[in-house]
Protein backbone atom coordinates (compact mmCIF):
# COMPACT_ATOMS: atom_id res chain seq x y z
CA UNK A 1 0.00 0.00 0.00
CA UNK A 2 1.34 3.43 -0.95
CA UNK A 3 1.95 5.76 1.99
CA UNK A 4 -0.44 8.67 2.42
CA UNK A 5 0.82 11.99 1.08
CA UNK A 6 0.81 14.74 3.70
CA UNK A 7 1.33 18.44 3.15
CA UNK A 8 3.61 20.76 5.12
CA UNK A 9 2.91 21.14 8.82
CA UNK A 10 1.03 24.27 9.87
CA UNK A 11 4.30 25.66 11.27
CA UNK A 12 5.83 25.38 7.77
CA UNK A 13 3.02 27.08 5.87
CA UNK A 14 4.60 30.56 5.96
CA UNK A 15 7.15 29.19 3.47
CA UNK A 16 4.36 28.77 0.93
CA UNK A 17 1.85 31.49 1.81
CA UNK A 18 2.04 35.28 1.86
CA UNK A 19 -0.50 37.90 2.91
CA UNK A 20 -1.83 40.07 0.10
CA UNK A 21 -3.95 43.23 0.09
CA UNK A 22 -5.59 45.15 2.87
CA UNK A 23 -7.67 42.11 3.84
CA UNK A 24 -4.47 40.08 4.31
CA UNK A 25 -5.67 37.24 2.11
CA UNK A 26 -3.36 34.23 2.06
CA UNK A 27 -1.94 33.65 -1.42
CA UNK A 28 0.54 30.96 -2.41
CA UNK A 29 4.16 30.94 -3.59
CA UNK A 30 6.54 28.10 -4.37
CA UNK A 31 10.16 28.59 -3.24
CA UNK A 32 11.31 25.01 -3.93
CA UNK A 33 14.23 24.33 -6.32
CA UNK A 34 13.29 23.61 -9.92
CA UNK A 35 12.58 20.02 -10.87
CA UNK A 36 10.72 18.20 -13.65
CA UNK A 37 7.34 19.22 -12.19
CA UNK A 38 7.91 22.92 -11.69
CA UNK A 39 10.12 25.89 -10.89
CA UNK A 40 10.10 28.37 -8.01
CA UNK A 41 7.96 31.48 -8.34
CA UNK A 42 7.67 34.52 -6.09
CA UNK A 43 4.69 36.25 -7.72
CA UNK A 44 1.91 34.87 -5.50
CA UNK A 45 -1.05 33.00 -6.94
CA UNK A 46 -4.46 33.64 -5.34
CA UNK A 47 -5.80 30.97 -3.05
CA UNK A 48 -8.71 28.87 -4.22
CA UNK A 49 -10.66 30.30 -1.28
CA UNK A 50 -10.05 33.84 -2.54
CA UNK A 51 -11.27 32.94 -6.01
CA UNK A 52 -14.25 31.07 -4.57
CA UNK A 53 -15.24 34.10 -2.50
CA UNK A 54 -15.90 36.02 -5.71
CA UNK A 55 -18.93 33.77 -6.18
CA UNK A 56 -22.16 35.68 -5.39
CA UNK A 57 -23.33 34.60 -1.95
CA UNK A 58 -26.41 36.81 -1.41
CA UNK A 59 -25.60 37.07 2.29
CA UNK A 60 -27.99 39.92 3.08
CA UNK A 61 -30.74 37.72 4.60
CA UNK A 62 -28.18 35.72 6.63
CA UNK A 63 -26.53 38.89 7.99
CA UNK A 64 -29.92 40.30 8.92
CA UNK A 65 -30.89 37.04 10.63
CA UNK A 66 -27.66 36.82 12.65
CA UNK A 67 -28.01 40.46 13.70
CA UNK A 68 -31.63 39.97 14.77
CA UNK A 69 -30.80 36.83 16.76
CA UNK A 70 -27.97 38.63 18.55
CA UNK A 71 -30.20 41.61 19.30
CA UNK A 72 -32.74 39.31 20.94
CA UNK A 73 -30.51 36.80 22.73
CA UNK A 74 -28.07 39.38 24.10
CA UNK A 75 -30.56 42.13 24.87
CA UNK A 76 -29.62 42.14 28.56
CA UNK A 77 -26.04 42.93 27.57
CA UNK A 78 -26.52 45.70 25.02
CA UNK A 79 -29.40 47.36 26.89
CA UNK A 80 -26.86 48.63 29.43
CA UNK A 81 -24.69 50.26 26.76
CA UNK A 82 -24.85 53.67 25.12
CA UNK A 83 -26.55 53.85 21.73
CA UNK A 84 -23.24 53.87 19.81
CA UNK A 85 -21.86 51.01 21.90
CA UNK A 86 -25.02 48.97 21.44
CA UNK A 87 -24.97 49.48 17.67
CA UNK A 88 -21.33 48.39 17.44
CA UNK A 89 -22.08 45.38 19.66
CA UNK A 90 -25.07 44.19 17.62
CA UNK A 91 -23.82 44.92 14.12
CA UNK A 92 -20.77 42.71 14.65
CA UNK A 93 -22.91 39.61 15.22
CA UNK A 94 -22.54 38.23 11.69
CA UNK A 95 -18.76 38.74 11.75
CA UNK A 96 -18.57 36.89 15.06
CA UNK A 97 -20.70 34.04 13.70
CA UNK A 98 -18.53 33.85 10.57
CA UNK A 99 -15.33 33.73 12.62
CA UNK A 100 -16.76 31.04 14.91
CA UNK A 101 -17.70 28.95 11.88
CA UNK A 102 -14.23 29.36 10.38
CA UNK A 103 -12.57 28.27 13.64
CA UNK A 104 -14.90 25.28 13.89
CA UNK A 105 -14.14 24.32 10.31
CA UNK A 106 -10.40 24.50 10.92
CA UNK A 107 -10.73 22.23 13.94
CA UNK A 108 -12.91 19.69 12.12
CA UNK A 109 -10.17 19.51 9.48
CA UNK A 110 -7.63 18.90 12.24
CA UNK A 111 -9.79 16.08 13.58
CA UNK A 112 -9.92 14.40 10.17
CA UNK A 113 -6.18 14.80 9.61
CA UNK A 114 -5.41 13.30 13.03
CA UNK A 115 -7.70 10.35 12.29
CA UNK A 116 -5.98 9.88 8.93
CA UNK A 117 -2.70 9.43 10.82
CA UNK A 118 -4.24 6.98 13.28
CA UNK A 119 -3.92 9.55 16.06
CA UNK A 120 -6.38 10.79 18.65
CA UNK A 121 -7.36 14.42 18.02
CA UNK A 122 -6.31 16.88 20.72
CA UNK A 123 -9.85 17.79 21.68
CA UNK A 124 -8.73 20.02 24.54
CA UNK A 125 -7.58 22.47 21.85
CA UNK A 126 -10.78 22.16 19.84
CA UNK A 127 -13.61 22.99 22.22
CA UNK A 128 -15.93 24.27 19.50
CA UNK A 129 -15.50 21.07 17.44
CA UNK A 130 -15.72 18.38 20.11
CA UNK A 131 -19.30 17.51 19.15
CA UNK A 132 -18.16 16.68 15.61
CA UNK A 133 -15.74 13.90 16.55
CA UNK A 134 -18.37 11.10 16.64
CA UNK A 135 -19.62 12.13 13.19
CA UNK A 136 -16.06 12.14 11.81
CA UNK A 137 -15.47 8.65 13.18
CA UNK A 138 -18.80 7.44 11.76
CA UNK A 139 -18.01 8.82 8.30
CA UNK A 140 -14.71 6.95 8.17
CA UNK A 141 -16.26 3.77 9.54
CA UNK A 142 -19.06 3.93 6.97
CA UNK A 143 -17.08 4.88 3.84
CA UNK A 144 -13.87 3.00 4.75
CA UNK A 145 -11.65 5.18 2.57
CA UNK A 146 -7.98 4.63 1.82
CA UNK A 147 -6.21 7.92 2.41
CA UNK A 148 -4.14 8.84 -0.64
CA UNK A 149 -3.47 12.45 0.40
CA UNK A 150 -4.28 14.75 3.29
CA UNK A 151 -3.86 18.52 3.61
CA UNK A 152 -1.48 18.84 0.64
CA UNK A 153 -0.75 22.12 -1.14
CA UNK A 154 -2.05 22.20 -4.71
CA UNK A 155 -0.47 24.61 -7.20
CA UNK A 156 -1.47 25.76 -10.67
CA UNK A 157 1.32 27.92 -12.10
CA UNK A 158 -0.52 29.56 -15.02
CA UNK A 159 0.38 33.27 -14.92
CA UNK A 160 -3.16 34.40 -15.71
CA UNK A 161 -5.34 31.74 -14.13
CA UNK A 162 -2.96 30.17 -11.61
CA UNK A 163 -3.91 29.46 -8.01
CA UNK A 164 -2.79 27.72 -4.85
CA UNK A 165 -4.65 26.02 -2.07
CA UNK A 166 -4.63 23.25 0.50
CA UNK A 167 -6.87 20.36 -0.43
CA UNK A 168 -8.54 18.41 2.34
CA UNK A 169 -8.04 14.85 1.13
CA UNK A 170 -7.91 12.41 -1.73
CA UNK A 171 -9.62 9.13 -0.92
CA UNK A 172 -9.79 5.84 -2.74
CA UNK A 173 -13.23 4.27 -2.29
CA UNK A 174 -14.17 1.11 -4.16
CA UNK A 175 -11.46 1.66 -6.75
CA UNK A 176 -12.24 5.33 -7.43
CA UNK A 177 -10.01 8.22 -6.44
CA UNK A 178 -12.13 11.05 -5.05
CA UNK A 179 -10.98 14.57 -4.25
CA UNK A 180 -12.69 15.26 -0.92
CA UNK A 181 -13.73 18.51 0.73
CA UNK A 182 -14.91 18.52 4.35
CA UNK A 183 -17.53 21.13 5.25
CA UNK A 184 -18.63 21.55 8.86
CA UNK A 185 -22.20 22.76 9.29
CA UNK A 186 -24.38 23.71 12.21
CA UNK A 187 -26.75 21.02 13.45
CA UNK A 188 -29.44 20.32 10.89
CA UNK A 189 -27.79 22.44 8.18
CA UNK A 190 -26.60 19.87 5.64
CA UNK A 191 -25.87 21.09 2.14
CA UNK A 192 -23.38 21.46 -0.68
CA UNK A 193 -22.98 24.46 -2.94
CA UNK A 194 -21.85 25.32 -6.45
CA UNK A 195 -18.71 27.15 -5.31
CA UNK A 196 -17.67 24.10 -3.28
CA UNK A 197 -17.89 21.92 -6.37
CA UNK A 198 -15.83 24.55 -8.21
CA UNK A 199 -13.24 24.36 -5.43
CA UNK A 200 -12.86 20.62 -5.98
CA UNK A 201 -12.61 21.17 -9.73
CA UNK A 202 -9.81 23.68 -9.21
CA UNK A 203 -7.73 21.31 -7.08
CA UNK A 204 -8.21 18.51 -9.60
CA UNK A 205 -6.65 20.77 -12.26
CA UNK A 206 -3.53 21.65 -10.26
CA UNK A 207 -0.13 21.12 -11.90
CA UNK A 208 1.36 19.41 -8.85
CA UNK A 209 1.12 18.96 -5.09
CA UNK A 210 3.63 20.07 -2.46
CA UNK A 211 4.12 17.47 0.25
CA UNK A 212 6.44 16.81 3.18
CA UNK A 213 8.31 13.52 3.06
CA UNK A 214 11.11 12.48 5.40
CA UNK A 215 11.34 16.05 6.68
CA UNK A 216 11.76 17.54 3.19
CA UNK A 217 9.35 19.44 0.94
CA UNK A 218 8.78 18.01 -2.52
CA UNK A 219 6.62 18.49 -5.57
CA UNK A 220 4.71 15.36 -6.57
CA UNK A 221 2.27 14.70 -9.42
CA UNK A 222 -1.43 15.04 -8.68
CA UNK A 223 -2.81 11.51 -8.25
CA UNK A 224 -5.44 10.30 -10.68
CA UNK A 225 -8.78 11.92 -9.86
CA UNK A 226 -11.99 10.12 -10.82
CA UNK A 227 -14.47 12.43 -9.14
CA UNK A 228 -15.21 14.72 -6.23
CA UNK A 229 -16.91 14.31 -2.87
CA UNK A 230 -18.22 17.05 -0.59
CA UNK A 231 -18.86 15.78 2.91
CA UNK A 232 -21.25 17.92 4.93
CA UNK A 233 -20.47 17.26 8.61
CA UNK A 234 -22.81 18.15 11.50
CA UNK A 235 -22.71 17.02 15.12
CA UNK A 236 -25.51 14.54 14.47
Image (cartoon, helix red, strand yellow):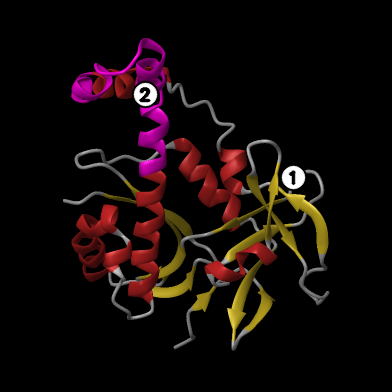
Q: Assign the magenta stretch its main secondary structure.
A: helix
Query: Which residue corresponds to mark 1?
Result: 161
Question: Which residue corresponds to the image point at 27% horizontal and 66% vertical from the top-left?
Answer: 123
Q: Relative to residue 226, is residue 219 depicted above or below?
A: below
Q: Relative to residue 96, is residue 227 depicted above or below?
A: below
User: Residue 140 at x, y = what percent?
Assistant: 27, 68
Which range of residues does the magenta coloring cover?
A: 72-100
Query: Which residue corresponds to mark 2?
Result: 89
User: Residue 201 at x, y = what percent?
Assistant: 55, 49
Question: Which residue corresponds to the image point at 20% horizontal and 42% vertical from the top-left?
Answer: 187
Q: Is residue 68 visible?
A: yes
Which sits in the foreground, 163 or 206?
A: 163
User: Residue 149 at x, y = what percent?
Assistant: 49, 72
Left or right: residue 101 versus residue 53 is left
Q: Is residue 223 visible?
A: no
Q: Residue furthest top?
A: 83
Q: Secondary structure at mark 1?
A: loop
Quarter where residue 37 is shown: bottom right
Question: Which residue corresponds to the image point at 38% horizontal and 28% vertical from the top-left?
Answer: 94
Q: Residue furthest left?
A: 236
Left or right: residue 62 versus residue 19 is left
- Mark 1 vs 2, N-terminal side: 2
Structural crowding at the residue carrying mark 2, measured as other residues with C-alpha within 10 Å and reported as few (<14), some (14–19) or many (≥20)? some
Amino acid sequence: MTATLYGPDEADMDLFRVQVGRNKERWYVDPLPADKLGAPFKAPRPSVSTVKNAWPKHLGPWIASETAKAAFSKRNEWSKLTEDQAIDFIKGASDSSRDDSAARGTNVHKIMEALSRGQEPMMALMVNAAGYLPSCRAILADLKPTWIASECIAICTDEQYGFGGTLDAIWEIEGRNLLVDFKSRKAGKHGAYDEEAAQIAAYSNADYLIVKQDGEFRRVPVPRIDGGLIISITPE
